[in-house]
Amino acid sequence: MSTVNLFEPLTLAHGPALRNRFMLAPLTNLQSHPDGILSDEEFRWLTMRAEGGFALTTTCAAHVQAGGQGFPGQLGIFGDQHLEGLTRLAAAIRKNGSVSAVQLHHAGNRSPKDLVGTPVCPSDDAETGARGLTLGEVEQLRDDFIAAARRAEKAGFDGVEIHGAHGYILAQFLSAEINRRTDRYGGTPENRARIVFEIIDGIRSSCRPDFQLGIRLSPERFGLKLAEIRELARELLHQEKIDYLDLSLWDVAKEPVEEEFKGRTLMSYFTELPRGRVKLGAAGKIMGAQTAREVLEAGCDYCIIGRAAILRHDFPNRVAADANYTSPPLPVTAQHLRDEGLSPAFLTYMSGWKGFVAEEGAVSA
């Protein structure tokens, strides 16, 4: 059992060390401008978390192609017009002692038609109306992920995280249900994962040697199979080309949904893998100090904080001051969230999360 303290620094294979074991989850927030340019609201939201003690401050999913937009007000990184805002953000995160990363994203068949027209997917998808990518478009998608990483580097970020989770386009490639291609990007698990490894290789070869690289995976749902994602993780850890693997588990204590894997936690299927120099973290209902410690004790190197970071911008600092700290009980008032740096757009989005925001006139806990 690990005895690592939440506030011990964490050295990564590339780039600066993390000052503690808390990473800000890449959280959808709808706060940027329609063209993907960083807004003052999103700048404030992220810099408050860097000030609040997060060792690694990760942006929301930033789309690498205009046609890969997943939600209104999404941060963009598909053009040089985004550089000014990204450069300002990277500098402010660094000023507050946090390591910075942009999460690279393409929504694939989850792109809303009213934002992108006809969405795209590894294969034609009748359910969403998405059309399958040509081979040339797959190669362009790969190259645009790599170009976005170079753009993040130019803006001064310490690294990027590749979004391979939550049923977005890279997870769609990984799914045998969604990806029915017959070329080198479809068929076997190795072929379906090919684009992921090509993106990693491209970023490593085109960015500076100390540029950090992570990837987010979800091991189930969205047509994914735990056994395949576990083998993908094993190979990613073995190759040691990434610095960290970010597991989005919905609940760090949950068991797998697949019957044959029940009887132990979903997280345990990954903490037992040899990881060499790569660091492993998990996200999912980490709402207080005790759960964060349990994640490290279970074998992770760091914790990824989502909802608790929405509720308190300074969650790490509060844990440092109180070993028994836990997040405020839900629901909270809209004013509480405004005080924590949420703009009207973000607040409206959170109001759609059942039981998160109290009705006007209700008393906050």
Image: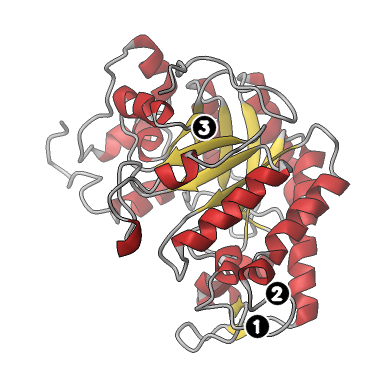
**Mark 1 is on which residue type?**
Arg
In the rendered image, the quadrant that contains the C terminus is top left
Residue 289 in the image: state x and y as whole percent.
Answer: 33, 23
The mark tally for this picture is 3
Q: Quadrant of residue 343?
A: top left
Residue at image coords 59%, 74%: 116
Residue at image coords 54%, 34%: 46
Between the C-alphas of marks 2 and 3, the distance is 32 Å
**Mark 3 is on which residue type?**
Met
Q: Is residue 107 left or right of residue 6?
A: right
Q: Is residue 32 left or right of residue 148?
A: left
Q: Which mark is residue 221?
A: none
Q: Which residue is mark 2?
A: 185
Label 1 SS: loop
Q: Which residue is mark 1?
A: 181
Q: Which residue is mark 3?
A: 23
Relative to 259, residue 255 above or below: above
